[in-house]
Amino acid sequence: MGVQSVTPLAITEARSVPRRRWGIAFLLGFGVLVNYFDRVNLSVSQDALHNAFGISTVTFGYLLSAYSWTYAAFQLPSGLILDRFGVKLVGRIGTFLWSAASFALAISTGLASFLGARLLLGVGEAPTFPGNAKAIGYWFPAEERSLATAIFDSAAKFASAIGVPALGLLLLRFGWRWSFAATGFLSLIYFVLFYVFYRNPSEDKSLSATERDFIRHGGAQPEDRVRAAKGAPLGYLLRQRKVWGLVLGSASYNYTFYLLLTWLPSYLSSTHHIDLLHSALYTSVPWLFATLTDILMGGWLVDKLVQRGRDASFVRQAILIGGTTLGLGVLGAAYAQSITIALVWISLAIGGLSAAAPVGWSIPSFIAPRESVGTLGGILNFGNQLSAIAAPIATGYIAQATHSFFWAFGAAAAFLVVGIAGYGFLLGRIETIPEPA
């Protein structure tokens, strides 16, 4: 089954359909926003945690990546569990766990308890992106899915844009414990909102018949409770060339993303001699730009071109490959001699990668066999999180050994070249993987 084409009549009808589905997209986006506040909180706390627990640069690199150990380990299980038990139940349990972990970070008494809370945070947040991809597949027709995905994916960039300066100021004013407590309260608010409002379309009593029909006839993933009991086997999906192409491309993006997410304040501080307050403020510039490219290019532009009759697979591939190629701009930051030039190159790199990101996260709902989006999303995010683990640690070692971020940025660029090849030669045309026999 390929991506359905869209007629001008369908576009006209879409404008008159109720918009409850967009409320679901913004709900999921708020969850990712809080999710990433939890992640960037640590990156602005290095000096405070050094004073509190006496950690070295390399130890901080391990602490940055610890969250990703459990997050990665639970990707494949969470994908399978999502397909078996559904987004609503798994999302509620996961959100409760990450709320508890956020408060545990705030009251940690030592490095061991802090590390334990970070590991629990990874467990709780593991189902977030595979679950969101599955939910968007249920709730949105094909021609709206890129923008819907961009709404929650861009929240990751927006969290970095506003979270780094906001949490940095909170830390400077009240201390690191209150900055972690703040994310705990936000997590608790999201838990309540998700518990009250999220349902699949078939369960949502507030969803009108008109909108339900529009979603179904637009090519949304069908809800199949019988098929959900088994879905496509994990081994079957792992044998698919398209899956490996998608995983390689997305993992290369995530390596650069996490390098910048976790080390950008330290890079600006050590290389360009910016203090913590100004480093946090400067850091927001690339992430604000990334938020815009995520929404406008990876979301709105893709859907608009598809709605106008352009080949959907070609449009999505062009954004994937073009955006990832722009990510090579991270090499420019390696050579930058001023803070202004460094921010221009970093903005170009993360802006291009962010345009590709929502397209990448929409692909599981286009290519996965029935009731297998969660499993494929888990495979995708497992690869992402291997990069998320490697990037902070490798960067810590490289920065400490060379007293520079030059080779750290060079390693990221080399991985991006591999990712571009994965999108171009392995993923190929974006169409549904055949059902297993």
Image (cartoon, rainbow, N blue to C red):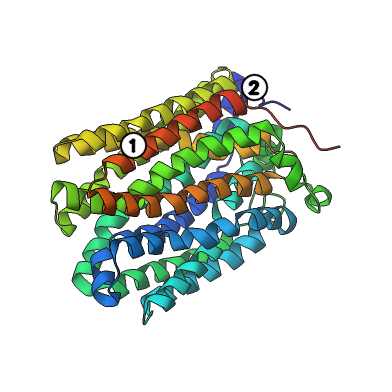
- Residue wearing tag 1: 410
How would you rate the neighbour count of disc 1 (Cα within 10 Å): few for under 14, some for 14-19, many for 20 or more?
some
SS at mark 1 in the image:
helix
10 Å crowding of disc 2: few (<14), some (14-19), many (20+): some
User: What residue is drawn where x is 33% and y is 34%?
Assistant: 349
What residue sits 55% from the left and 43% below the top? 19
Q: Earlier in the sequence, mark 1 or mark 2?
A: 2
| Quarter in which the C terminus is drawn | top right
Answer with the quarter of the image where residue 216 lies. top right
The residue labelled by disc 2 is: 5
- The residue sitting at the front extreme is 401
Residue 31 position within the rendered picture, expressed as x and y whole percent measured from the top left: 48, 57
Q: Given the image, on which type of amino acid does mark 2 rest?
A: Ser
Question: Tag on residue 27?
Answer: none
Residue 258 visible? The answer is yes
| Residue 228 coordinates in the image, percent (x, y) | 78, 51
Q: Is residue 45 visible?
A: no
In the image, is residue 212 above or below residue 109? above
Task: Give the amino acid at mark 1.
Answer: Gly
In what quadrant of the picture does the N terminus appear?
top right
* Point 18% across, 58% down: residue: 276
Please provide percent x and percent y for residue 357: 47, 38
